[in-house]
Amino acid sequence: MTREKPPVVEKVLVEDIAAGGKTIARIDNFVTFISNALPGDLVDLQIIRRHKSWQEARAVRFHLLSDKRTSPFCGHFGDCGGCRWQDLKYSEQLIYKQKEIIDQFKRIGNTDFPESEPIIDSDSDRYYRNKLEFTFTNNKWLNREEIEKGNGIIQRDGLGFHVRQLYDKVIDINKCHLQSEPSNLIRLSIRDFAIKNHYSFFDLKKHNGLLRNLIIRTSSLGEVMVSVVFYEDDPDARDDILGHIAGSFPEITSLMYAINRKANDSIYDLEFNLYKGRDHIVEMLDDLRFRIGPKSFFQINISQALKLYRWVRENASLNGSEIVYDLYTGTGTIAIFLSKYAKKVVGLEYINNAIEDAQINSSLNNISNTRFLCGDIRNILNEDLLKQEGYPDIIITDPPRAGMHKDVISAILLASPNKIIYISCNPATQARDINLLSGHYKIIRIQPFDMFPHTWHVENAVLLEKLTV
């Protein structure tokens, strides 16, 4: 029995962009989500999956290209899982990111809100990241050109990023436009040295091989950290590879390594060892220094992070007498950034390594009015803590994409600060949480920031003030 070919619908106009970056068309009252087209394209769509009231499709023919399009600048565009909006003009990216915030607040927020202020664009849409994580593979993804060559044995070892929507497939990256040099030079040198010396690359399905991951961090001060994650614990091979890196790139500030034999790539439970240099690099925000280790949480777009932190400082309007709580404080960047303008800043975070970094960064800047506490925020933000540390005049909260637990929102209402500044990389959960605060707080300002050009991700900051009785 032959399988029925998926239906094709001809000459459909792509209308809009949905949350998550997919585009939208409407076919016979079905909302249709498209993975490879842009608003304004006139396309033939092949239906991939159909649900009760919506369906998924892929453009198989383009009759007319949108005037919102531009030429991608990366040779890996379309295969690589990153930079999925490279074919969309940057000015249009900003429009759709701002639109998503407004749509989410209308749909989920269920409360009055002022007009969003214009999104603050990134100083650069290339080389803006200070951290990249690469994966070694012994079975790299072959593009159409490589397959069509078909001229015998193809080198299958590679080092790069995961293929879009295929976690077990990795593209061997020749050049990445996200991080400044020496990032590309270091990655290619390590890859070529390992291939030349027949060191094994990781098998993502069988879980074997010497080399597993590579993490490169840079700072605006010109410092570089390279962390190599091995799967096999082979001291001779490890020393040979790390020796090559150290000898080839004397400008590296910190060269670290770890062994990861777990089923996942998470590094936060690994022990990193220093091979050469310092065990950290340093970043500057205004006149503040921040120590960044191999497992530190830190904003990846430093120029945009500085704009965001200055916005927070401006809207906090501190006069030196206030108690500030910084929820999900991470390595304490916002807490430390505000500390000299407040009486005291209390940072709460559930990851112990981040708290340790926050304490070190406070000491590094000779700051004595911060206090950092580790634990599940829904448990530690309670009446006992409020009595011990003092009730906050303002709360800053920057939770993960999942947003805040209802118990955290209840604790915020118990604390009853005069102001809340809510920062989020997920406008949907942000709007949901603010809706739960709406009976007690009103939105004063909404300010989006573009932290991640050429992606659909957007950072949003909201200022709320307590309603007067």
Image (spheres, rainbow, N blue to C red):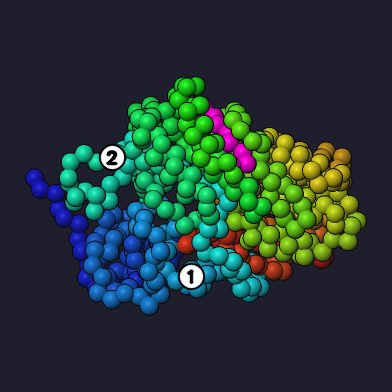
- Against 114, residue 228 (above or below) is above
The stretch drawn in magenta includes residue 256: yes
Closest to the observer, 42 or 379: 42
In which quadrant will I find the N terminus? top left
Q: Which residue is mark 2?
A: 155
In which quadrant will I find the C terminus? bottom right
Q: Which mark is residue 90?
A: 1
The magenta region covers: 252-260
Question: How far is mark 1 from mark 2, CA to CA?
Answer: 36 Å
Closest to the observer, 176 or 13: 176
**Residue found at x 45% / y 25%:** 237
**Residue found at x 55% / y 65%:** 124
- What amino acid is found at the position of numbered circle 1 in the picture? Tyr
Please state the horizontal and vertical placement of residue 24, each as a whole percent of the image: 37, 67
- What amino acid is found at the position of numbered circle 2 in the picture? Gln
Please state the horizontal and vertical placement of residue 212, each as a whole percent of the image: 44, 33
Circle 2: element type? loop
Is residue 420 visible from the viewing direction of this image? no
Q: Quadrant of residue 15?
A: bottom left
Please state the horizontal and vertical placement of residue 254, each as a whole percent of the image: 61, 38
The stretch drawn in magenta includes residue 139: no
- Against 20, residue 156 (above or below) is above
**What is the magenta segment's predominant secondary structure?**
strand
Q: Quadrant of residue 359?
A: top right
Label 2: few (<14), some (14–19) or many (≥20) C-alpha neighbours in 10 Å: few
